[in-house]
Image (spheres, rainbow, N blue to C red):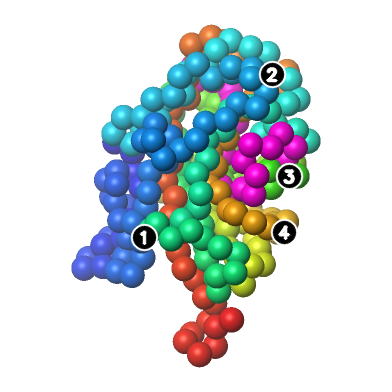
């Protein structure tokens, strides 16, 4: 069963079952279920790299078609024409997140278990400005990145921003990733990612300043592969991802922007 971070305010215990919530005053985590009708799919390159995406009990299974990746398949390249899913970024009550808000933080979590023979791909969930664009600097994506390669023992988890190389922590026992991207009065700050091993101990974390955002904000799930990587037909990736948006005016009452 996938694990989503939660906090029991009565016991102080952390961890919990899929669909867990948060401490009093914090919104519940929302599962990234791109099949629930609230997400829009886009494949700007019309390359059909992804065969199917299924979600059951919060677990996402991506089944790929066979292909040799080009530079446009990489989620961290100058251009990215591959599969992505997106929806408007909203608070828990459905109110759209706006850059004019005093402050907000997007939190992200992924559970990527060991699966022998999985596809050597790139996946990421985060915030974007233009989810259907093909130029990464225009997509303006920033968030939590993972490369769930267990065939060769290369589980990378870390942070990604636009067309910069992902900053990742490598460990053969990596399983969980936690990320957060913070905004204050329309200004974007640091995007942070923390890699966590299956036993709950830390592998390491990375952060990078985000570029400027304008207009409508989206939460986006991107699916790609590094250039020249060969993906075999019917190979899969299995993961569970969640996110939540927290209203975070900085500072105590009376001292917030």
First in residue order: circle 3 vs circle 2: 2
* Mark 3: secondary structure: helix
Q: Quadrant of the C terminus?
A: bottom right
Q: Is residue 40 above or below residue 242?
A: above
Residue 123, x across and y down, in percent: 56, 34
Residue 77 figure quarter: top right
**Badge 4 vs badge 1, beta-carbon distance below 8 Å:** no
Q: Is residue 64 visible?
A: yes
**Residue 93 numbered tag:** 1
- 10 Å neighbourhood of mark 4: few (<14), some, or many (≥20)? few
Q: Is residue 208 above or below residue 53?
A: below
| Residue depicted at x 64% and y 20% | 46
As measured in the structure, the alpha-carbon distance from the residue carrying label 3 to the one carrying label 4 is 11 Å
- 10 Å neighbourhood of mark 3: few (<14), some, or many (≥20)? some
Image side of residue 65 versus residue 35, left or right: right
As measured in the structure, the alpha-carbon distance from the residue carrying label 4 to the one carrying label 1 is 26 Å
Q: Tell which tag, 2 or 1, sits nearer the viewer.
A: 1
Residue 215, x across and y down, in percent: 64, 56
Residue 48 figure quarter: top right
| Residue depicted at x 60% and y 45% | 158
**Badge 3 vs badge 1, beta-carbon distance below 8 Å:** no
Q: Which residue is mark 3?
A: 138
First in residue order: circle 4 vs circle 1: 1
Image side of residue 219 versus residue 137, left or right: left
Magenta stretch?
Answer: 117-136
Which residue occupies the foreground of this view, 101 or 206? Answer: 101
Asked if residue 150 is among those painted magenta in the image, a careful observer would answer no
**Residue 212 numbered tag:** 4
Image side of residue 1 versus residue 220, left or right: left
**Residue 69 numbered tag:** 2
- 10 Å neighbourhood of mark 1: few (<14), some, or many (≥20)? few
Q: Tell which tag, 2 or 4, sits nearer the viewer.
A: 4
């Amino acid at each position: 069963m996938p694990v989503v971070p939660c906090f029991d305010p009565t016991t102080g215990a952390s961890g919990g079952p899929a669909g867990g919530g948060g401490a009093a005053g914090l919104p519940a985590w929302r599962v990234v279920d791109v099949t629930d009708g609230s997400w829009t799919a886009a494949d700007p390159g019309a390359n059909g790299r992804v065969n199917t995406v299924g979600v059951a009990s919060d677990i996402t299974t991506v089944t790929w078609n066979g292909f040799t990746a080009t530079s446009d398949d990489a989620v961290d390249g100058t251009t990215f024409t591959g599969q992505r899913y997106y929806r408007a970024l909203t608070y828990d009550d459905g109110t759209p997140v706006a850059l004019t808000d005093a402050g907000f933080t997007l939190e992200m979590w992924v559970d990527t278990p060991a699966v022998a023979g999985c596809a050597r791909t790139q996946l990421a969930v985060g915030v974007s400005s233009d989810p259907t664009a093909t130029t990464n600097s225009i997509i303006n994506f920033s968030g939590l990145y993972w490369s769930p390669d267990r065939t060769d023992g290369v589980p990378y988890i870390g942070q990604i921003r636009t067309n910069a190389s992902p900053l990742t922590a490598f460990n053969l026992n990596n399983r969980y990733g936690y990320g957060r991207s913070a905004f204050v009065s329309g200004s974007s700050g640091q995007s942070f990612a923390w890699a966590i091993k299956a036993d709950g101990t830390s592998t390491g974390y990375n952060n990078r300043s985000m570029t400027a955002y304008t207009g409508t904000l989206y939460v986006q799930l991107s699916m790609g592969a590094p250039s020249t990587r060969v993906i075999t037909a019917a190979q899969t990736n299995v993961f569970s991802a969640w996110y939540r948006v927290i209203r975070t005016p900085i500072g105590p009452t009376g001292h917030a922007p």
